[in-house]
Amino acid sequence: MSTLKVTNIQATGETASRAVSGVAAAWCNYDGDNTAIQDSNNIASIADSGNGRHQFAFTNAMSNSDYAATGNAGHSGFHNVATKSSAFGTVSASQVTIRVSQTDSSADDDDAQTSFAIHGDLA
């Protein structure tokens, strides 16, 4: 068996390449309480859009807005998907808005441990 070692991956037709450590087109772990990115790939910036809502600009744009997005949220290191809901609001090739809310009350909520991943084609 052969071993293929690469630093970056670039799909046919894409102009941007992806770091092997972040095969998703973009991902982010952020602190919603303090509007701070803890770690990420292909995320240029974060902006506070209100309680429980944050907007993220991609470093390299997606090819369109039809990408797949998943996420979760919680406090104190626990990603509690039972009582939190993360939804994706404004979605475009250059940015995405994340909304985190309590599932039992629908109240928007900033969380210290929030993360998401974007899968799709880069422009």
Image: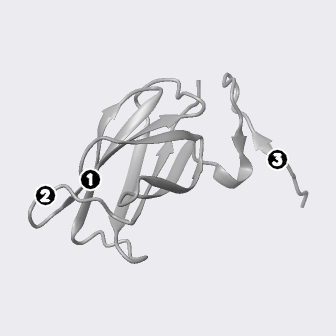
In the image, what residue type sits under mark 3?
A: Thr
Q: Which residue is depicted at the point 40% across and 30% down? A: 66
Residue bearing mark 3: 7
Which residue extends farthest left? 105
Q: Position of residue 68 (x, y in %)?
A: 42, 41
Asked if the residue under mark 2 is in contact with the one under mark 3, i.e. CB atoms within 8 Å, the reply is no
Q: Give the answer, above or below, for where 44 lies relative to 30.
A: above
Q: CA gap, disc 3 to disc 1? A: 35 Å
Q: Secondary structure at mark 3?
A: loop
Q: Position of residue 3 (x, y in %)?
A: 89, 57
As rendered, which of 85 and 29 lies closer to the eye?
29
Amino acid type, residue under disc 1 in the picture = Gly
The residue lying furthest to the front in this view is 34
- The answer to whether 95 appears left or right of 8 in the picture is left
Specify few, some or many for label 1: CA neighbours under 10 Å numbering under 14, 14-19, or 20 or more: some
Of badges 3 and 1, the one in the foreground is 1
- Sequence-first disc among 3 and 1: 3
- How many neighbours does mark 2 have within 10 angstroms: few (below 14), some (14-19), or many (20 or more)? few
Q: Residues within 10 Å of mark 3 (few under 14, many from 20)?
A: few
Q: Residue at x 71, y 34 (%)?
A: 17
Answer with the quarter of the image where residue 21 lies. bottom right
Against 92, residue 6 (above or below) is: below
Question: Judging from the image, what secondary structure is the residue with disc 2 in?
Answer: loop
Q: Are marks 2 and 1 in contact (CB under 8 Å)?
A: yes
Looking at the rendering, in which quadrant would you find the N terminus? bottom right
Q: Nearer the viewer, residue 37 or 79?
A: 37
Name the residue that disc number 2 marks. Answer: 107
Mark nearest the camera among 3 and 2 is: 2
Quarter of the figure with residue 100: bottom left
Q: Report x, y in % for residue 82.
A: 24, 72
To which residue does mark 1 refer? 52
